[in-house]
Structures are given as C-alpha cells and as structure tokens.
Image: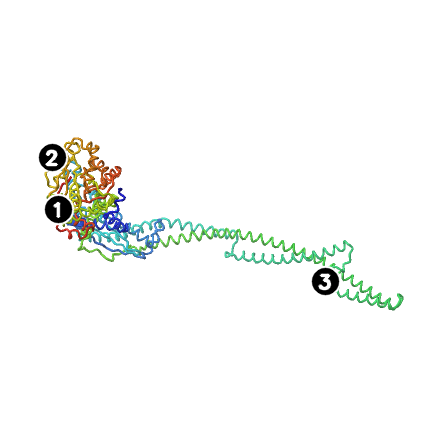
C-alpha cells in the first residue's frame, strides 16, 4: 500500500473540501485570525505607546504662535518708475508678493528687529542664560568657552533664533502676507510678529528716502551735461539749414519735385509711344520707296481721308473712261474730256500722297525731338530729387539727434522734479490689516493629536509584529496546514488535555471524552487504509521526542483491542516509555530479549488490565538496538506476530534522531506520523516524511497532537463546537517521548 492509497481516508477528504476556498479568501482569513490571536498584545502595545507619548508631550514646553497680516499696496506712487535707472524695477503681481516675502525673511530685517526690541538682553533670548547642562558641565571642567559672549555674537545668536521661529506665507494669489512667530510666551510671540510687520514698513520707507536722495544727486549731476548736448545738436541743425538754404523743413520742395517727375515720366511715356508710331509709319514709307512700290497702297496713306476720297474719284473717272471707250473712239471729244478728268484725278492723288508722306516724315522728326527733350527733363528732375533726398537725410539725422536729446533732457528734468518734490515718500510699501494678538492655545505640542497618532502607530506596529511573528511561525497549527505545509493527509487531531495521569489508558478511563472520539477517528482511518490486508502492522513515529507518539500508539491499540486481537510493541529500545504511559510495571524481558533469543514470547508479553490488549515491552536496553532491528530474527518475529494478531502496533523512536523508524517501516503495512501542534517546525517534519518516503514507507496519515481546540477556535476559526462537545475531556501530560 502506498501513501496515495492512504489519501482516501476521512482526514484527507476534509482537507480537500477546505482547499476549495479561494486563495485570496484564505489569505485574508489568515490575517484576520492572526489579528484575533494577538489582539490583546496589539492593543496593549498601542496603549503603552500612547501613554508614553502622553507623558512625553506633557513634559514638553508649549509653544504659541501669533500672526500679523500685511497687505501690499497695489499703487505705490511714481517713485517706483525711476528704479529703472538702477536696473531694479519692481516686479508685479505674484512675483512681487514673493519678492516682498523673501525680504521679510531676510536676515537683515531679523537683525533690525532684534536690535530694536533689545532681545539680546531679554531673559528669554539671552544666550548666556540658555546654556545646556552639557555645556555647563564642560565649562566647569574647563572645556569649551567659559567667557561671556560678545554683543555681536549675542546679536547673531538672537537673529538665528528669530529666523528659525519666523514663518512668512503669502496667501494664495492675493497681495496678503502673513507673519507668524512661535515662542513659549504668547505675549512675546505677538510682540515680535507685530515688530516684524512695523519694522518692514518703516525700513522700506527709509530705503525709499535714501533711494530718492541718491537719484536726485545723480540726476542733478547729469542734467547739465544733457542740456549742453541738446544745445549743441540744435546749433548743428540750424547751421545745416543755413548752409543748404533749406526753408521748407516739412519736405515741400521734395514733394514738388516728385510731382514734377511723375508728370514728366507720364509725358515721356506718351512721347515714346508717339515716336514709335511715327517711326513705324516712316519706316513703311521708306521701305516702299526703296522697293519701288506704289505708296497709295500703304496703310499709313490709306488712313488719310482725303486720299480715300480721291481714290474714289479716280475710280469713278476710270469707270467713266471705260464706259465711253465702248461708245466713242479715242479721238472723240467725250473720250478726250474723260481722259483729261482721269489724269487730273490721278495728279490730285499723287499730290495728296506726297503731302501725307511729308506729314509722316515731319511727325516722325517732331516725335523724336519731343522724346529727347522729355528724356533730358526727366534726368534733370531726377538729379534734383537725389540732391534733395541727400539734404533731407542729413536734415532728418540732425532733427532726430535734437529730438532724442530733447526727450532725454525732458525725462531727466521730470524725474528730477519728481524726486525733488518727494510727493510719494510718505506712502508705505504695505499696511497692517490684522495685527498679531497673544494666542491662548499653543500650536505645539498637540497633545490629543500626538496621543492618537501614537496609539495608531502602536496598533499598526503591533499588527506588523503580529503578522511578522505569524510569518516566522514555522509550526503546524491546524489540520488545514498539515495538508498545505506537509502535503500529507490528516488522520486525526488530538486535543490538548490538562492534568496528569496514565495518559496511555485515557481511552479506557474516559471513553466519551473528546480525546477518545479523536482516537476512534484514527482507528476508522486505519481500518479504511490497506483495506485488503487482513492483518496490519502499524509503525507509530514522530520527528522528535515529546510529540505524544507513545500515548497515541497506546490509546490507538486500546481502541482496536475492543474488536480485534491487537499487540502493542514498544520498539523504542533506546528510550522506552510505553510502560510509564500505560501505568504498568516495566517487564524485565521484552522485545530485545525476544529478538536476542534470551526469552520466549510468552515470557515477554503482558495483557492490559481491563482490555484484551497484549503488550510487548522494550526489555533491557541493548547496546546495539539498530542491529537487532536489522536482524533476520526480528523480521521473522514481525511476520510471525502479524499472523497471530490482527493488528500489530510498533511504538518507534523519532525519525530525526535515529534510523530505527525507517527500518521498522520496511516491515510495516503502514506508518502513522505524529506531530505536535504549535511546536514542531514543519520543515523538520517534511524532512522526516521525505526520509520515510525514501524508505518506501506507506504513510496512513498524520496525527496532529496536543492541539488546544479553544485557542484554535478563537484564533483560527477551526474546530468550532469541539470544546462544548468534549467538556469531559481529561488532562494531558507535559512531557512525552
């Protein structure tokens, strides 16, 4: 039979059902059970830390804070504009508020306040009166400074204290600034806060006055030079006007020349167009002459209306001659007259064409002359305009020089008048809108808040420590953890019993107790394991001594003896404990005597009083127990006894200390592993189970022993109702092998 077969037991079924819960739910449930387990320790730690904090804050000297509120003036007069002369123009808006806040935080202002209030000689601030006990002890031993501090050193020390306890805070996007000072004396806190506000305003007004004086001196020094420079530039302008005979200083001459140039350019363009037309007509005539062509077909000639009329007359005369030639002969008077009229018409045509040609030639010459004349006039006007432009540029340059010097002189003169008048020197940079008053409630320490925070931190620390301890706890505390940490089926869970007595007989003495019910559960699991084996050899072992394996083996044997023939063997021949657990006298002969051949079985076996259980003690402690267990005689003895008894139970030594249990497991039908709850590290138990597995042992299950059901119910939520059901449970021992 293997351990896989043993997983069909009832204990394993319960674990399988529990493991179906979601992992997150199990984790949260574990945290909750841990907090319930350590709740009083956690609450106690929180209360202790809160009490300690309360005592500490009660011993701390209270500190009071008083606040004065300033508002920066939005419009602070014309004097601010002259700061541009020094490169220090005032910032506006939020930047200006931040700038003034930094001025309020400055060391210079704190030093002025310290001096005005004479805080260096005030008992609350005097450094000589506030020497620590360590410094006084060192001074008494001749170590360190023993002479009083100088006035300058005192002033520096007081200034440092003022700056350390001063808080300057702009209020949002407004022009308001709060000045807060913290001190043990509420009246002193209000006095210093108001002193900072008033000193800041007063110091700003004094700075303005000094700045105005410096600006006045500087302006007075530069005004004379600026005036001379202005006069020099004005003289240069007038000399240039006289030299160039410039009267129209507004540019009238230049604008007239420009208008004249525009007209000439327009006429020149028209003349060039006329010249081009005349040249085209002239070139047509010259080309016709050169080619010997008739001029009466040229377009320039045909455009003439007289030529057109004459051509019509000539055509009419030719038609008449043609008609008469059909009727009369060349000698007829009508023909002669018609021929004379035609010749006269042609002669008139030629004269008119000659006139047209002459007019075209004349127009061409006139157009060319006109174009040349206009071109010359344009060039002349352009030269005049260029000369005027040069004069105008020089004039403008001199005028700008005069204008610049005039503006600079006027500006300096205006600033000089402003600073001399000093009309805005009485305007402060800010005003106090809410003076500081002596507070009645200290700002620190906040006792209630500190105590509550300490309580919360203590509880949080306690919770953290509890969770850490729970994480560091490597023991097995519930049947669920047997399956999770050991990966083995649970056979039964035995309760932690109180009192002393013959714990090996508890099943007989208290058959209705909770302990006896757990033994019967284990008995059922054993019967259901290796169900095909008619006779069973069981080995009961554990990791280390003191886990209750002997008590469990004895009571399991007593439960089986009610219905079966059972033999209980004390196989721990190193430290036998079975006789003591059962409350019987140790036998002088036992397993060691039987295996060594010194005695017969009937001489070694005993019967339990009030039960059919047979007991085979360990006998005398041999020098070599392991050799006896490895012998063939022991093997044959186990086989013989398993045939005679239905169940043979061997109480084995712990697995971790010796290898006896692994030898015994090779002769057994199955192994029952006993583990003490909240005691044995599960890593150790796993190593022992792995050793049994390597020895090919068949594990029937794990018995979780000495579990406090009440504690498990309250801390882990397991075994609810067990304590009520088993109120008649008996006591337990404190040490068990």
Q: Give the secondary structure at mark 1.
A: helix
Q: Which residue is mark 2?
A: 588
Tell whether label 1 touches label 2 (CB within 8 Å): no
Q: Position of residue 515 (x, y in %)?
A: 15, 47
Q: Position of residue 20 (x, y in %)?
A: 27, 51
Q: Which residue is mark 3?
A: 303
270 and 517: which is toward the camera: 517
Q: Is residue 319 left or right of residue 488?
A: right
Q: Position of residue 313 (x, y in %)?
A: 78, 66
Q: CA distance from mark 2 to mark 1?
A: 25 Å
Q: Position of residue 143 (x, y in %)?
A: 16, 36
Quadrant placement of the N terminus: top left
For the question of whether residue 601 can be seen, the reply is yes
First in sequence, mark 3 or 2: give its number: 3
Q: Is residue 291 left or right of residue 456?
A: right
Q: CA distance from mark 3 to mark 1?
A: 160 Å
First in sequence, mark 2 or 1: give its number: 1
448 and 604: which is toward the camera: 604
Q: Is residue 463 left or right of residue 314?
A: left
Q: Which mark is residue 508?
A: 1
Residue drawn at point x = 78 percent, y = 58 percent: 294
Q: Give the secondary structure at mark 3.
A: loop
């Amino acid at each position: 039979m293997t351990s896989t077969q043993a997983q069909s037991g009832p204990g394993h079924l319960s674990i399988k059902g529990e493991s179906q819960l979601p992992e997150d739910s199990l984790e949260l449930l574990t945290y909750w059970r841990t907090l319930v387990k350590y709740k009083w320790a956690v609450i106690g730690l929180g209360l202790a830390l809160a009490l300690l904090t309360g005592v500490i804050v009660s011993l701390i000297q209270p500190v009071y804070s008083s606040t004065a509120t300033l508002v920066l003036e939005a419009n602070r007069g014309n004097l601010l504009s002259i700061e541009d002369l020094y490169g220090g123009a005032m910032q506006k808006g939020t930047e200006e508020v931040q700038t003034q806040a930094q001025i309020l935080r400055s060391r210079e202002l704190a030093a002025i306040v310290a001096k005005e209030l004479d805080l260096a000689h005030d008992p609350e601030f005097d450094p000589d009166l506030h020497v620590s006990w360590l410094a006084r002890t060192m001074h008494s031993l001749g170590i360190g400074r023993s002479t009083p501090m100088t006035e300058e050193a005192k002033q520096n020390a007081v200034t440092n204290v003022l700056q350390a306890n001063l808080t300057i805070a702009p209020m949002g996007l407004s022009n308001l600034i709060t000045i807060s000072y913290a001190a043990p004396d509420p009246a002193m806190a209000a006095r210093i806060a108001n002193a900072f506000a008033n000193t800041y305003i007063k110091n700003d007004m004094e700075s303005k006055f000094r700045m105005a004086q410096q600006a006045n001196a500087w302006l007075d020094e530069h005004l004379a030079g600026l005036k001379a420079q202005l006069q020099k530039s004005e003289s240069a302008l007038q000399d240039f006007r006289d030299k160039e005979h410039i009267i129209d200083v507004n540019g009238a001459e230049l604008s007239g020349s420009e208008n004249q140039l525009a007209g000439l350019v327009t006429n020149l363009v028209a003349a060039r167009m006329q010249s081009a037309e005349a040249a085209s007509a002239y070139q047509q005539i010259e080309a016709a002459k050169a080619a010997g062509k008739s001029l009466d077909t040229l377009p320039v000639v045909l455009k003439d209306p007289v030529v057109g009329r004459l051509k019509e007359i000539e055509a009419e005369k030719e038609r008449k001659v043609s008609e008469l030639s059909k009727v009369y002969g060349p000698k007829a008077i009508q023909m002669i007259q018609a021929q004379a009229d035609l010749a006269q018409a042609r002669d008139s045509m030629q004269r008119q064409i000659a006139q047209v040609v002459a007019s075209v030639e004349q127009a061409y010459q006139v157009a060319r002359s006109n174009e040349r004349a206009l071109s010359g006039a344009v060039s002349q006007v352009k030269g005049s305009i260029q000369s005027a432009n040069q004069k105008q540029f020089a004039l403008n340059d001199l005028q700008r020089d005069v204008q610049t010097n005039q503006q600079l002189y006027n500006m300096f003169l205006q600033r000089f008048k402003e600073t001399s008048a000093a009309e805005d020197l009485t305007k402060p940079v800010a005003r106090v809108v809410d003076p500081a008053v002596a507070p009645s409630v200290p700002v620190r320490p906040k006792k209630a808040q500190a105590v509550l925070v300490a309580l919360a931190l203590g509880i949080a620390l306690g919770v953290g420590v509890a969770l850490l301890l729970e994480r560091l706890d490597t023991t097995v505390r519930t049947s669920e953890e047997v399956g999770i940490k050991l990966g083995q089926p649970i056979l039964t869970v035995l309760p932690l019993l109180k009192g002393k007595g013959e714990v090996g007989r508890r099943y007989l003495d208290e058959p209705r107790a909770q302990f006896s019910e757990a033994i019967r559960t284990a008995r059922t699991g054993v019967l259901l394991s290796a169900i095909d084996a008619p006779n069973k050899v069981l080995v009961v072992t554990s990791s280390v001594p003191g886990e209750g394996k002997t008590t469990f083996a004895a009571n399991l044997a007593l439960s089986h003896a009610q219905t079966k023939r059972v033999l209980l063997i004390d196989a721990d021949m190193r430290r036998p404990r079975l006789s003591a657990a059962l409350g019987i006298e140790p036998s002088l002969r036992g397993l060691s005597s039987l295996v060594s051949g010194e005695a017969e079985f009937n001489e070694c076996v005993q019967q339990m009083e009030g039960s059919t259980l047979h007991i085979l003690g360990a006998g005398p402690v041999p020098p070599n127990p392991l050799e006896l267990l490895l012998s063939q005689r022991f093997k044959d003895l186990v086989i013989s006894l398993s045939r005679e008894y239905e169940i043979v139970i061997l109480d084995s030594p712990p697995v971790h200390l010796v290898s006896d249990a692994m030898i015994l497991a090779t002769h057994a039908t199955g192994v029952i592993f006993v583990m003490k709850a909240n005691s044995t590290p599960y890593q150790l138990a796993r190593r022992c189970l792995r050793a049994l597995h390597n020895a090919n042992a068949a594990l029937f299950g794990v018995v979780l022993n000495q579990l406090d059901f009440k504690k498990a119910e309250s801390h882990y939520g397991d075994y609810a109702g067990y304590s009520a059901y088993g109120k008649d449970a008996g006591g337990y021992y404190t040490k068990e092998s």
